Image: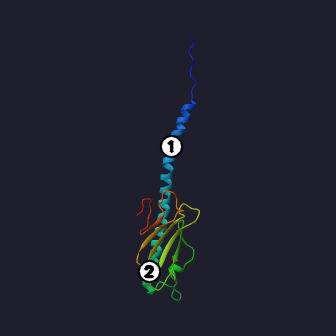
Amino acid sequence: MKTQRRAPGFTLIELMVTVAIVAILAALAYPSYRNYVIRGQLVSATNGLSALRANMERFFQDNRTYVTVGAFTSPCTIAGQTSGLFSLTCTGAGAPSATAYILSATGQTNTNVAGFVFTVDQNNTEQTIVSSSAPSGWTAGTYNCWITSPSGC
């Protein structure tokens, strides 16, 4: 009697089960990975604002004002400041004034951080504005802190 030998390899069913398992794992892992990357990019905004705020306070200690004095240029007036994917600017009317400033870090468009705006003022009042154009999973709104995770402050 002849015995039939089974050909080595995978059956189509085994291959499809493997593909399904990989697809399920990818569907669960990708959103977590994306939030991990975004959280890492948000830190560059808070670091940039902290450094610019320290420069503003150092300038104030030397000149007793936040505005440019003669040849001494206020750190706020330096154009094109960036930190990671964020543009750093001074906002508000007469920014900065002699005794006040508001610094902001705005996420650049067409990036993962578009829709995020971080601010800090001379009193160290921190605020985050998350717009509806922020990535999914991040709740739009205004927060009285710097948020760096989807769960908020």
Q: CA distance from mark 2 to mark 1?
A: 53 Å
**Coordinates of residue 55 in the picture (x, y in percent):** 46, 77
Asked whether disc 2 touches disc 1, contact meaning CB atoms under 8 Å apart, the reply is no
Q: Tell me where residue 96 appears, x and y as whole percent.
A: 50, 82
Return the residue found at the far bottom.
Answer: 70
Residue named by callout 2: 58
Q: Secondary structure at mark 2?
A: helix
**Residue indicated by mark 1:** 24
Secondary structure under tag 1 reads helix
**Within 10 angstroms of label 1, few (less than 14), some, or many (20 or more) residues?**
few
Q: Measuring 50% from the left and 59% from the top, which residue is drawn there? A: 38
The answer to which image quadrant residue 77 occupies is bottom right
Q: Amino acid at mark 2?
A: Arg
Comparing marks 2 and 1, which lies closer to the viewer? 1
Residue that extends furthest to the top in the rendered view of this protein = 1
Taking depth in this image into account, of 8 and 126 the one nearest to the observer is: 126
Q: How many marks?
A: 2
* Residue closest to the eye, 98 or 135: 135
Position of residue 126 in the picture relative to residue 68 (left or right): left
Look at the picture and state if 83 lies above or below 5: below
- Image height of 140 relative to 76, above or below: above
Question: Could you tell which of marks 2 and 1 lies nearer the N-terminus?
Answer: 1
Q: Amino acid at mark 1?
A: Ile
